[in-house]
Amino acid sequence: MGSDFNILSTRASVQDCYDRVIEDAKQGAAFLENSPVHVMRPSKAAAYGLLARAYLSMRRYDSAYRYADLCLQLKSSLMDLMVMRI
């Protein structure tokens, strides 16, 4: 990497990007709390939601279901966005 625009850059494949996101989310989930102290802090449910969304985008529905279910077991309440209007 550098600032020379004459040097061609290389990009990772889409599969490599998905693999990295999934690996990072799984590793991160191990260190996160089930319910954070503050709503703006990351949680295990958020990591599971990210994994569910990534697998859904990859059309791996069995894994998407698994992580969505894990997410909903930890956090199943919905946010009322109408209350949050300014």
Image (cartoon, rainbow, N blue to C red):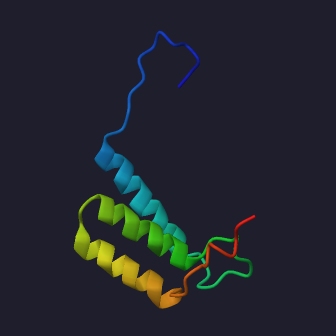
- Residue drawn at (63%, 85%) of the image: 35
Q: Residue at x 39, y 65 (%)?
A: 53
Q: Quadrant of the C terminus?
A: bottom right
Residue 77, quarter of picture: bottom right
Q: Is residue 36 left or right of residue 4?
A: right
How many labels, in total? 0
Residue 19 % position (x, y): 35, 55
Percent of width and height locating residue 26? 45, 69
Against 74, residue 41 (above or below) is above
| Residue at image coords 27%, 58% | 58
x and y, in percent, of residue 48 in the image? 46, 74
58 and 24: which is toward the camera? 58
Q: Quadrant of residue 57?
A: bottom left
Q: Quadrant of residue 41?
A: bottom right
Q: Nearer the viewer, residue 78 or 7?
A: 78
Between 69 and 8, the one lying in front of the other is: 69
Q: What x and y, as percent, mark residue 22?
A: 40, 62
In this rendering, is residue 18 above or below 41? above
24 or 80: nearer the viewer: 80
Seen as rendered, the residue at the extreme bottom is: 73
